[in-house]
Amino acid sequence: MSSDSYWTSPATLSRSFEVAKLLCFVSIGLILCDTLHFASFDWSLIRGDRKRRWPQIPYFLVKVVWYVYSALNLAIVFAPTEINCQGVMEGIEFCMGTIVVCCSSLLAARTVCVYSGTARRVVSAVLIVLGLALTGTWMAGVPDVRAVWTAAAAQPWSTGGCNYAKVETRYFVKYLVTIVFDFTVLVLTIIGVRRMGRPRIGAILVNHGLIYFFISMASNLIVCVLTLLRLSPLMSLVGAVPSSCVSIMAATRLYVYLTDDTRPKNGGAITISQLSSSSSTPKKLASLIRNAAGKRTSMSTKKGANPLGDIEKGHPSISNGISVERSFEIHTDSSPTLEGQTSSLGHQISPVDSKHVHIV
């Protein structure tokens, strides 16, 4: 602890406590606004309008745990009668660890998606090991903060209050491990995107990943520095709630933006913006059309039908009494670029006036 008694004087502790309360209320308000802002997105996930994927588990879990975390913080500040301060404090630390692990998992899940094959398995294994280390570090640090009930901290509405008696010096380690994990994820993301040729989704991952990393790193470093300075137990914890708030907002927003951007537009249409920029648009369009026609031809040929007639007329092939219909829509701002391209059936595609080409 610092030899200077300024930070441990009753007047300074009182002011520090008020600052901590203000930061807590601001953080709760920001997350509440974020929840309302993305309520329609969350509801679409709950209703099943979007495909179920495992990252939705940490996405919703971190939101639920945040409100439990907020309730525990409010309980330790506004408890009217004596409570088990140490038990509540350990609950707070456990929630903080869960929040950090969920936020880092959301970012790591997107990193894995930019790899394939053996590289994907290796990156997944590395991130799983690091994720387990991150989880273990935070869970091992749950009892690092000591809190006791004291009558000296009484408020007009209470008979006392919880006093932060001690914060272990090793408290900063879990924040440092979080920074290392997030930095590793960021580096792996950049490497994976460069291997892909920087498609649009990769650019979003890198740009938003950088924003997330620097914001999260700044908030975590503040807690590390305050802990190492050993000014007072309260000052060591003053940045904990804002740090959790920043991590949640950055990680969940990144997940929402990427999910919306990779979702097929216009009822399942494939948009040019979702394709990689590594090759020209006409080649992509021709490839998609050839694949679509090829699939349709093989389905019709099995039943002895005329494949060209089925495709041109848009009639669905019938197999065992089940009507099968595939619909493809390709959006482009310059349909005339298709002129001269041929499908696998040998028919030339002529330019069209509409900005949509439909193959049914």
Image (tube, rainbow, N blue to C red):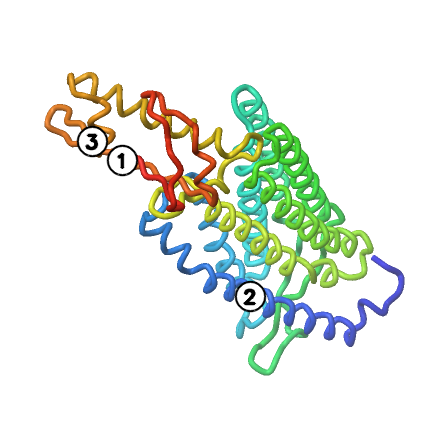
Q: Residue at x 65, y 68 (%)?
A: 23
Give the mark nearest the N terminus, 1 or 3: 3
Left or right: 289 as drawn, with respect to 88: left
Q: Residue at x 64, y 73 (%)?
A: 151
Q: What amino acid type is highlighted by mark number 3? A: Val
Residue under numbered circle 2: 28
Residue 181 spot, x, y in % from top left: 66, 38
* Secondary structure category for the residue under label 3: strand
Tags 1 and 2 in contact by the CB under 8 Å rule? no
Q: What amino acid type is highlighted by mark number 1? A: Val
The quarter holding residue 114 reads: top right
The answer to whether residue 130 is above or below residue 40 is above
Residue 27 spot, x, y in % from top left: 59, 65
Q: Residues within 10 Å of mark 3 (few under 14, many from 20)?
A: few
Residue placed furthest toward the bottom: 156
Tags 2 and 3 in contact by the CB under 8 Å rule? no
Q: Residue at x 48, y 29 (%)?
A: 283
Q: Is residue 139 visible?
A: no
The answer to whether residue 6 is above or below residue 177 is below
Give the mark nearest the N terminus, 1 or 2: 2
Distance (Cα) linking label 1 and label 2 = 50 Å
Quarter of the image with the N terminus in it:
bottom right
Q: What amino acid type is highlighted by mark number 2? A: Ile
Left or right: 231 as drawn, with respect to 211: right
Residue 279 spot, x, y in % from top left: 55, 30
Residue under numbered circle 1: 360
Give the mark nearest the N terminus, 2 or 3: 2
Quarter of the image with the C terminus in it:
top left
- Residue 324 numbered tag: 3
Q: For the residues carrying marks 1 and 2, which lies nearer the camera in this image?
A: 1
